[in-house]
Image (cartoon, helix red, strand yellow):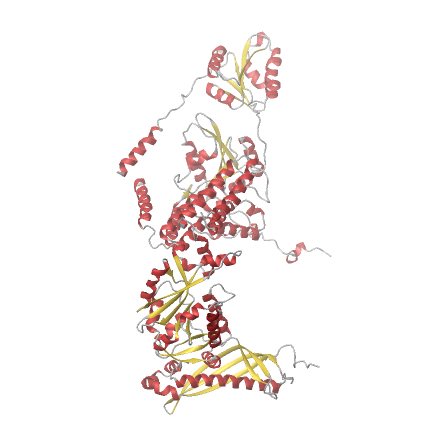
Amino acid sequence: MFRRLINKAKNLFSKGKEKKHMKKDEMQISKNIEENYKQIEKLFAKSEDVTIRRFIMGKGDVKAFALFIDGMINKKLVDDDILKPLMLSTRSIKPSEEKIPNVYNWVKERVLVTDELKETTSFKKSVDAALSGDAAIFIDGYDRALLASTRGWEERGVQPPTTETLIRGPKEAFTETLRINTSLLRRKIKNTKFKLESMVIGEVTGTQVVIGYIEGLANPKIVKEVKKRLKDIEVDSILDTGYIEEYIEDNPLSPLPTMHRTERPDAVASKLLEGKVTILVDGSPSALTAPTIFMEFLLTSADYYQRAIFSTFTRWLRYISFVITLLLPALYVAVISFHQEMLPTPLIITIAAEREGVPFPSFVEAILMGLMFEVLREAGTRMPRPIGQAVSIVGALILGDAAVKAGLTSTPMIIITALTGIGVFVIPSVDMALTLIPLRFLLALLAATLGLFGILLGMLIITIHMASLRSFGIPYLSPLAPGTYQGLKDTLVRAPWWAMNTRPQLMTENEVRQDINQKPQDPEDNEENLIDE
Amino acid sequence: MKRKVILLVIITLLSSSISGCYDRRPIDNLALVAATGIDQAKDKDKIRLTVQIIKPSVIKGESGSGGTKGQSVWVLSTTGYTVLEAVRKFTEQVGRNLFWAHNMIIVFGEDLARQGVNEYIDFFNRNPELRKRSWILISKGVDAKEILEAKFDLESIPASAIDLLVKSEKDNAKVRAVDLQEFSKLLVNPQVSPTAARIELVAKDDLRKKEKKAKETGAKEPPKRVRANGAAIFKEDRLVTWFGEKEVRGLLWVLGEVKNSIVVISCPDDKDKKISLEVTQANSKITPRFVDGEPVINIKIKEEGNLGDQMCKENLVTLEGIEMLERRQAAVIRNEIRLALKQAQEVNSDIFRFAQVIHRSFPQKWKKIKGDWDEIFPRLQVNVEVDSEIRRIGLVKRANEAK
């Protein structure tokens, strides 16, 4: 019976597989300008933002036109650096000279003063260039087009991060423009070894995707694997890094994320320096990094900017709240329905008193309150900002307090729900935080049916699953399992920078990060540094 | 492969519902037992089991603001031939399952204790819910039920008040506190006679009179107060005698369980004036010897303490003074031990573990006298040696003289 069901499901899915490729336009540019013009007009019919500027060059009748898209080009640049020289300075060409040597080369080498100039014979390429903000110049009699870089559109500037705010550390975040994002990275890593390779994914959207890595640090196998997986994507559109993530992650059905997403250039830079690979997508203000281990989701870049002892403390705080937010409702349900002997007498009296008159079993109570919190949280993210405050008042004060007074739930449950709900946001990665929510409900279900034994089972399942995960070949639980001493320096504690001598093993090609003996010394121990009094 | 995994997940999820929350006991379906009492029922074969059940909502109301306050606990009894039978009868009255994990005290009535407690302790050892830390108390002169009905002003749950009482009196070496675990061990050990804490109502006669008066006049019943001190001395599993405050400390000196206590001695010149010495540390060593084939026990007590206060005016903080204090203190301790020994020997109850000590030191000789121990113990020669030391004398040399 299952087989039939599964086959049916397979058929349903495979229908979508029939490729509806856009017809590939392998047309070449014609020598006849009128033909080109007609072709372009046909292609861009009903596109009111497309401009085709016709003009005549020189004193004679060399017809030409420029194709660009209004709003995506820098108008001043097109006017001053392309149209003006083409129309004015070509006047010096004498009719007799016009055929020799040839106008095309002359224009290319002497007239156009833009910094970036490409040429192509492919019709498609010239249209694509125009679509991404270049100006394509067609000249009568030549089967080639000149592509001048004139990009310039309204864009959001670099702003402080909104979801990953820190007290110390750089306060800039990625924006939607790919070029700005790459420049943010390049400014941090001024090195020729820092490579940025580009490719275009998405047959309709034609989105530019950039892979960044540091040669000599990144494992070439991983870089190759990332490129291969990206090349294998055949899809109509890529609108955000989230699309890419789902197409290339190792275990797409796992609830746990196996790629890290961040909006902080400094975080990406630090990961690049560990030998990881980053993927930037045009139009998306977040970058993906791979390979990703589980521990990365519990660390923030501020850990590395603050003092080591304090960072270790906050790190452990995060680990503890991770466990709390995953297990607290389940533990509560298990203890008060199965293991009452575990509670101290005064506590069990209080809980029993609170539970008196609550109509639901504690599991239903936990699910109801948990869902209520999730509804409030989801509403909070959608809510227009001016209404947000009203929601928090309704949620926190009225719903919580009233639910207890109405006898729908007990006060300990409210405390547990609040603690778990808030505890989630101690985890720096939103991806990981949201993953925990369904897991938490699952564990509560196991706890309600089997008690602490159920929780143990659930944790075993989760741990085994995590141990089996790989992210681009790197074990998900490393450096805990397989454990390395050097890895623990950046996991159990945040060792001071002078003590972290190696990059994460497994990932990088070059483990040595610095010389040993970088610990600051007492100047009196070092006689050279003695200051004469 | 993939299908197998999906199948496995479905089976796992479905199987979790098969158990149907087996063994689940919602907290609001439990009756929390705080104290248990066992008496002899009117029908001689049966026992009367009394439990003190906590009423959580009343206790919560008390800590909150005002409101009507009922009793914070519910004391009720059933009878039965066995303990479990009596326990199950509570369902007729309670409607919830009794939950034993938070039981703090188990009280045996004197009448029942004199007939033997072994048959009734089995339930408490067998039940997995019960903690073995419940105190075993023997009520002197009154039924266990009356002890459970006593009220306390500070604690809302009487059982926890008695629990605290036993603990603090234990620290003062005024009660021989024994929990279920230790009591069961003592019961099964053939070489030791069990002991347990004594609990009684304060000024019993006085309260009874008041009670009568109250009943006649219809006034409110005066609250009963309880006191936990002394010890109940068993022979095998039967209560044979009571130890008072002095004797119980004598017993505790020998067992080495005096942690913190006050020894009061008289001033050298004036018998009416007293000096109190604070014990800070004490340990005991029991060494058996054989003289002419007869066992002799040597008890050596090493005790350290401070000078707590003195009523007399002499300066006792001299070498001779301190020595005198130490001598007197040793005499008091010796006397207490003698009292305890005498009473124990009278009822032939080896509560000091002498048999065990002899067995361990002289296993061969013990085998010979083992059968005659009941005759040997009452006339056993015991030498007591007390080494008392005063370590600190406080901030003043002598007491201030009033003008």
In the picture, measured across the screen, residue A97 lies left or right of residue A487, that is right
Residue A91 location in percent, x, y? Answer: 61, 11
Residue A472 location in percent, x, y? Answer: 42, 41
Q: Is residue B345 above or below residue A135?
A: below
Residue extending farthest to the right is: A533
- Examine the rendering and report whether any part of residue A511 can be seen: no
Which of the two residues, A269 or A406, is positioned nearer the viewer here?
Answer: A406
Q: Is residue A407 above or below residue A233?
A: below
Residue B135 location in percent, x, y? Answer: 42, 70
Which of the two residues, B272 or B24, is positioned nearer the viewer here?
Answer: B272
The quadrant of the picture occupied by the C terminus of chain A is bottom right
The quadrant of the picture occupied by the N terminus of chain A is top left
Residue A221 location in percent, x, y? Answer: 43, 39
Count every numbered label the image shows and give the total. Answer: 0
- Examine the rendering and report whether any part of residue A26 can be seen: yes
Which of the two residues, A388 or B282, is positioned nearer the viewer here?
Answer: A388
Q: Residue at x 56, y 53 (%)?
A: A309
Residue extending farthest to the left is: A1
Residue extending farthest to the bottom is: B292
Q: Residue at x 51, y 66 (%)?
A: B153
